[in-house]
Image (cartoon, helix red, strand yellow):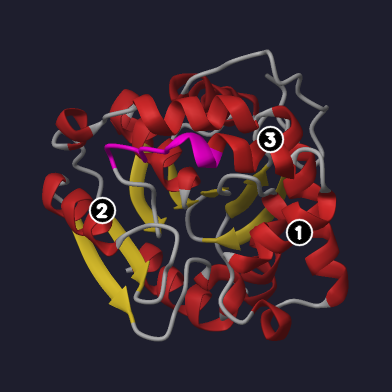
Amino acid sequence: MNLYCERLPNRADSDVLFIHGNLASARWWKPTLEHWPQSSGSGSLLTADWRGCGRNPDWHSDRQFTIQDLAQDFFELLDRERLDKVQIVGHSLGGLIALQMMILQPERFTKSVLLDPVGAEGVVFDDSMYEAFRQMALNRDLTRTVILSTILNADEALSQQMAEEFADDAFKAVKGIGSSVLEILKSINLSDDARSVQTPTLILHGQQDMIIPLKDSEKLASLMPSAKLEILNGVGHCWNVENPARFTERIHAWLKG
């Protein structure tokens, strides 16, 4: 899988891979990159789109895949970029992909940040969620409303252009990978494997996150022996776009420390 990737060289002490969440794209990391401090280090900042997302080719909804497939896509990207060891930052379902990667090839990761990650046991949906995804795949305006509702104070946090880009990316994704993602979320359980992850991990969870319950991050932090949980007052599900300056400051300090 030849994922679309942008690499900014000489921006960090170590190479950092950013993985976006469901119905999103690498564009969600643009505010983070804009606030990233200048560095004299040789490390790169890498943002990439999942299969079927962002600037990758459209994905046919009948082509199912697993969380292991998504992890393997990113391993292939790291191999292509000739990166043996990286730090990894994952948001929402991107956090679960990052966890799967740390389980499969722990030697490749020196530190990680999981922002409002999907819990190790995934998410159980009722039939209404499947119907909601079907309706979103038929209606861009509905998709726009749903994706922007995940961002606290989206009207203030996003420019009009960025809001429309997020909506376009979400509409593309829900029409293609949406069904596979729902299957992943309802069937996955990485709880036992998470106990083996020794990578120092910062788990950040917005107190006002209406998407992922705080208890899921609390449980994940209790499973991972080298994890630290921070609960963020006044923050929703998407600190990386709600307040990118503060988000970037915090994760930069963690990764550099």
Main SS class of the magenta portion in the image: loop
Closer to the N terminus: mark 2 or mark 3? Answer: 3
Between disc 2 and disc 1, the foreground one is: 1
**Is residue 257 a member of the stretch shown in magenta?**
no
Residue 123 forms part of the magenta stretch: yes
Q: Quadrant of residue 40?
A: bottom right
| 56 shown above or below 164 | above
The amino acid type found where label 2 is placed reads: Asp
Instruction: Pick the quarter of the image with the N terminus.
Output: top right
Q: Nearer the viewer, residue 65 or 252?
A: 65
The amino acid pointed to by label 1 is: Arg
Please give the name of the residue rendered at 66% of the width and 13% of the height, measured from the top-left corner: 63
Residue extending farthest to the right is: 161
Tell me which residue sits at (43%, 49%) in the image: 87
Q: CA distance from mark 2 to mark 3?
A: 26 Å
Spatial CA span between label 3 and label 1: 14 Å
Q: Which mark is residue 144?
A: 1
Viewer-proximal residue among 157 and 27: 157
Residue of label 3: 134
Residue 5 visible (yes or no): no
Q: Which mark is residue 111?
A: none
For disc 2, the marked residue is: 216
Name the residue rendered at 20%, 29% in the picture. Answer: 193
